[in-house]
Amino acid sequence: MNRDIIRSERAAKARSTVRSTVTYIILTVWAIIVLFPFYWMILTSVKEYASYNSEYIPKFFTLSPTLENYSSAFTAVPLAKYFLNTVIFTVATTALMLIVIIPAAFAFSRLNFRGRDAVFTLFLSLMMIPYELVVITNYTTITNLDLRNTFTGLILPSVTSVFYIYLLKENFAQIPDELYYAAKVDGTKDLKYLFKVMLPICRPTVITITVLKVIECWNSYVWPRLVTDDPNYYLVSNGIQEIRENGFGRENIPAMMAAVVVISAPLIILFLIFRKKIMEGVARGGTKG
């Protein structure tokens, strides 16, 4: 009897080991597939132009790395200025969006006013409108207001998001009503309750929304391309196209990859810093009750 139990335990342990091994192998292969483009991008960016062009068969390493391509990326076009423009656009847009969506989410989740559910349903229905129609409408409005080639024209159409309002509203709704009623009994104002209670509790979600908005702004291409034709207002996404057209041309792939590495690095660093908060915010967003 004891032998049968021991055999059964060994068999279960062996099956568990096999499953874990297979799982780790699959995850390792998948990680290599996902990360390989980033490795190839960095590898290409440190290859010499002549060395890269002489490779009839691509090499997966280089014995003579160089940083000359990064210098070329900043001297071919004013990439540093594009960086500054992108930082201004990203910080201003994200800050204004938080100022808009946080009170909106609080109102939809805690305040009782006539037509609240109908207005929120109307808000959600706006998500069904194709992005192309919104772009056309926004472009016409910005042009009529003579805001093309201005930071105001770049920022205004992106200062709100129905999806982020919905996500934050659902997180606010998970906070027990008893806390709100107790705060009201103590004479706490709504704004004080929002900033002292709700936002600290939902901090991971707020951080997640902030990071996602920063990524969205940093990678924005279509809208800046439409409303700016003045290089003084180009963002880094437009700067890549400028490099291809008026910089060192399309044939200098290593320098292009260097520019892409420089542009991508802030987002990667941002994600690595806040990855735990992002995972926590996503997990909270998928939890009810």
Image (spheres, rainbow, N blue to C red):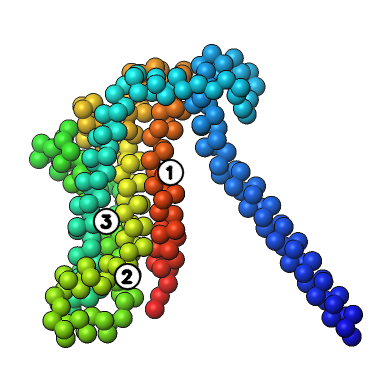
As rendered, which of 118 and 197 lies closer to the eye?
197
The amino acid beneath tag 3 is Ser
In this view of the protein, can residue 120 be seen by the observer?
no
Q: Secondary structure at mark 2?
A: helix
Q: Tell me the amino acid under the disc marked 1.
A: Ile
Q: Is residue 61 above or below residue 151?
A: above
Left or right: 110 as drawn, with respect to 146: right
Q: Is residue 112 left or right of residue 24?
A: left
Query: Mark 3 and 2 residues: CB-CB less than 8 Å, in contact?
Result: no
| Residue 161, numbered label | 3
Q: Residues within 10 Å of mark 2 (few under 14, many from 20)?
A: some
The answer, for residue 213, to whether it is visible in the render is yes
Question: In which quadrant of the rendered view does residue 184 lie?
Answer: bottom left
Q: Residue 178, how many percent across, how many down?
A: 27, 85
Pointer 2: what residue? 201
Residue located beneath label 1 in the image: 268
**Judging from the image, what secondary structure is the residue with disc 1 in?**
helix
Image height of 70 relative to 84, above or below: above
Instruction: Give whichever of 168, 21 is nearer the camera.
Output: 21
Position of the N terminus by quadrant: bottom right
Q: Residue at x 54, y 29 (%)?
A: 43
Q: Earlier in the sequence, mark 1 or mark 3?
A: 3
Q: Residue furthest left?
A: 145
The answer to whether the residues at label 2 and label 1 have Cβ atoms under 8 Å apart is no
Q: Nearer the viewer, residue 261 or 288?
A: 261
Please name the residue shown 30% across and 44% down the image. 217
